[in-house]
Structure formats: C-alpha cells, structure tokens
Amino acid sequence: MPFEQKYTDETREQSLARVLERREAEPGNRAIIRETAEQFEVGEQSLRGWIRAWEKANAPAASVIAEEAADTAEDGSAVRDDADAQDEPAAAPAPRRGRPPGSTNSNKAGGGDQASADRVAELEAEVAKLRRDRDTLKAAIGVLVGD
C-alpha cells in the first residue's frame, strides 16, 4: 500500500518559500514557522521537516561560497572577511513602519527628492549584488550536482 501524501507539492513549495522569505525580512521573529503553518494549514512539524530538508540540500552551496571567500587574493595576501562590506550601502536601512521609501513628505523643503533618488540607487545596487550572489549560488549548485 503506497504512502499517500497529505500535502501537495505546491503547498510545500509555497509554505517553504514563505518561511525563507520571512526569515530574511524578520530575522528575529521566532513565530514564523507557526504563523506560516497556520496560514497554509499545514502541520508545524511537517513544515520544519521541509525546512530541514531544504537546508540540508542547500548547505553544500553555502560551504562552496565560504571556501571562495577564504581564497587568497592575486598577490597572495589573505582576502578580508569584510570585503563585501564595501558593496553594502553606508546609509541606515529604511524604517519598516511609516512612510514607504520614496514617498514625499510635505514637511521637507526640496531635499526629499534627492534623498529618494539616492535611496533608489542604493536599492538598485543591492538588487544587482543579490542577483550576482544568486547566480553564483546557482553555479555552485550546478557544479555540485554535476550538470
């Protein structure tokens, strides 16, 4: 008698994606799994199992990236661990509550437009960096899988 799956693959993928997305957005929130399980009407332990399986499947890619970061520079000197800090925006992150970034405030006297443009440029640079990181991870997974 074959085992009948209780949840569809789509439900698994969507709930797992939601947990991973929320973990990035809310790193200190310890109720993410419970809330997501309730939202998708799945068991908390099932969701935890899917997360563990995903983390186990994606852990080798993280070690490959860590090894690349530990490589030495062309001149033989060790690469600093905070080398990527130069790519990060120097400004404080946008507040999570209140007005969304880029919205105008009638109390500002003309400086808001430049601040908004600067913030948009920062966010675009961050998106570009994240896309490069994603492509690097995909390539690392391809090497590990043997494509």
Image (tube, helix red, strand yellow):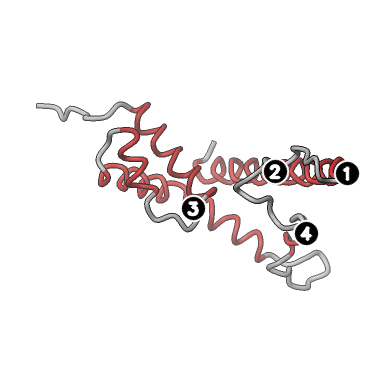
Question: Residue 5 falls in which quadrant of the image?
Answer: top left
Are the residues tagged 2 and 4 within 8 Å (C-beta)? no
User: What mark, if any, has residue 90 been given in the picture?
Assistant: 4
Single out the mark in the foreground, 2 or 1: 1
Q: Quick check: 105 above or below 40?
A: below
Where is residue 92 drawn, in percent x and y? 72, 58
Helix, strand or loop under label 2: helix
Under mark 1, the amino acid is Gln
In the depicted view, which residue is nearer to us: 58 or 89? 89
Are the residues tagged 4 and 3 within 8 Å (C-beta)? no
Q: Calculate the distance from the C-alpha at mark 2 to the C-alpha at mark 4.
A: 20 Å
Q: Name the residue under label 3.
A: 60
Q: Mark 1 points at which residue?
A: 114
Q: In this view, does 101 lie to the left or right of 66?
A: right
Q: Calculate the distance from the C-alpha at mark 2 to the C-alpha at mark 1.
A: 27 Å
Where is residue 76 drawn, in percent x and y? 79, 71
Which image quadrant: the C terminus?
top right
Helix, strand or loop under label 4: loop
Q: Calculate the distance from the C-alpha at mark 2 to the C-alpha at mark 3.
A: 18 Å
Which badge, 2 or 1, comes first in the chain's sequence? Answer: 1
Under mark 2, the amino acid is Arg
Are the residues tagged 2 and 3 within 8 Å (C-beta)? no
In the depicted view, which residue is nearer to us: 51 or 68? 51
In the depicted view, which residue is nearer to us: 130 or 147? 130
Which badge, 4 or 3, comes first in the chain's sequence? Answer: 3
Under mark 4, the amino acid is Ala
Which badge, 4 or 1, comes first in the chain's sequence? Answer: 4
Under mark 3, the amino acid is Pro
Single out the mark in the foreground, 4 or 3: 4
